[in-house]
Image (cartoon, rainbow, N blue to C red):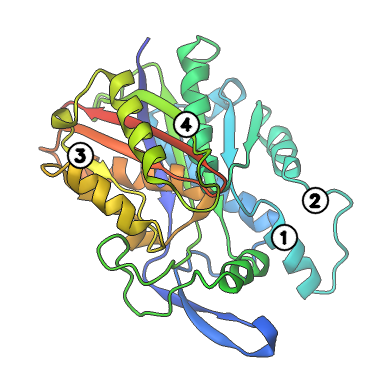
Amino acid sequence: MNIYLNAASAKFADSLGQRTSNMLGQPLRFPYFNAFEEPLLSLEQLYAYFDLEIDRTLQQAGWDKSELKHIPILLGSTAYVISDCEARLAHNLPLPKEHSLTVIAEDLHARYQTEVFSFATSCTSSAQAMGYAYKMLKSGMYEKALVIGFEMFNRLTFEHFQAMNLLSQEAQYSPLTDPTGIVLGEGIGCVALSTQPNPQLPCEIVGVTPLTDNENLTNSSESALRNLINACLNNANFTPADIDGVKVHGVGGNSDEMELRVLQEIFPHAQWLSIKTQTGHTLGASGALESAILFNQLKSELQKCGRFLNYFLGFGGSNIAWVLEVNK
């Protein structure tokens, strides 16, 4: 059974903005990709954005909203309820009794009357959610699935990255080619997977390969990246020469040099695509968000077809890759 990326919608920053770190009482301004007007999103505001992106994705896919009760929703995020808790504290409101990542899944289950699953594997959260959705459809459990990746600014994550000295202070963000540190971002990506292709853009997902990096849990290792790429191509029955484009991971951090070296060796002929220059590193949202942006870019380029490797590397060693095969 073939599985297709059928439709996608994304909300991300229009341009590079700023956020202020208050570490040790010394305010420092860092570049940040702000996608939302609200400085801190409450759950109610987040759900309103979910409604918009789900509606847009269903419309693009040609699916009726009444079908939602039969379509599972898979969530991936790093932030989950942290922003809501910080917004409550900022407005002197009490914290909820429950504030685990399952709260959002339970709320959406009640909201849409369908099965909802949560994934929290750091930067690959929504990418792993896409991989699991692929397996659910491949096994015949469902014919359709929605995957939502979301990330919103919160002080805990931002100050954590600043404390580790990982954030860039440069006005330009050029990960991989000129790494000066990570620029974080927020946004929402919603993608529709189906056993039936979108006639406007038949985009098949093949070779889905999750792989754990046991060598380095905080910085992607070269051997793990090579193994991930080779295993993915092998599972898809492709060689490196069959790949036309590579959606790179590059975040502007310490592993960029290694990643660049591997890409130059394996894919010297392929086009490299960096989505993070438009969005920043959206952490747990990046899998669905970057896939949505790539899908819509391919859709707009009417003559574009070919095979595009997508890989995502996660803090904690949770990595995953697949190939999008586009035929028009």
Say above or below: 228 vs 36.
Answer: above
Q: Amino acid at mark 1?
A: Asp
Q: Residues within 10 Å of mark 2 (few under 14, many from 20)?
A: some
Q: Amino acid at mark 2?
A: His
Q: Which mark is residue 99?
A: 2
Q: Evaluate if marks 1 and 2 touch, with contact meaning CB atoms under 8 Å apart.
A: yes
Q: Residues within 10 Å of mark 3 (few under 14, many from 20)?
A: some
Classify the position of the C terminus by image quarter. top left
> In terms of secondary structure, where does tag 4 sit?
strand
Q: Is residue 283 left or right of residue 229?
A: right
Q: Which mark is residue 84?
A: 1
Q: For residue 302, which quarter of the picture?
A: top left
Q: Evaluate if marks 2 and 3 touch, with contact meaning CB atoms under 8 Å apart.
A: no
Q: Nearer the viewer, mark 1 or mark 3?
A: 3
Q: Name the residue located 64 percent from the left edge and 66 percent from the top edge.
A: 154
Disc on the earlier residue, 4 or 3 = 4
Disc on the earlier residue, 1 or 2 = 1
Disc on the earlier residue, 2 or 4 = 2
The residue carrying mark 3 is 266
Q: Amino acid at mark 4?
A: Leu
**Cα distance in 3D space between marks 2 and 4:** 30 Å
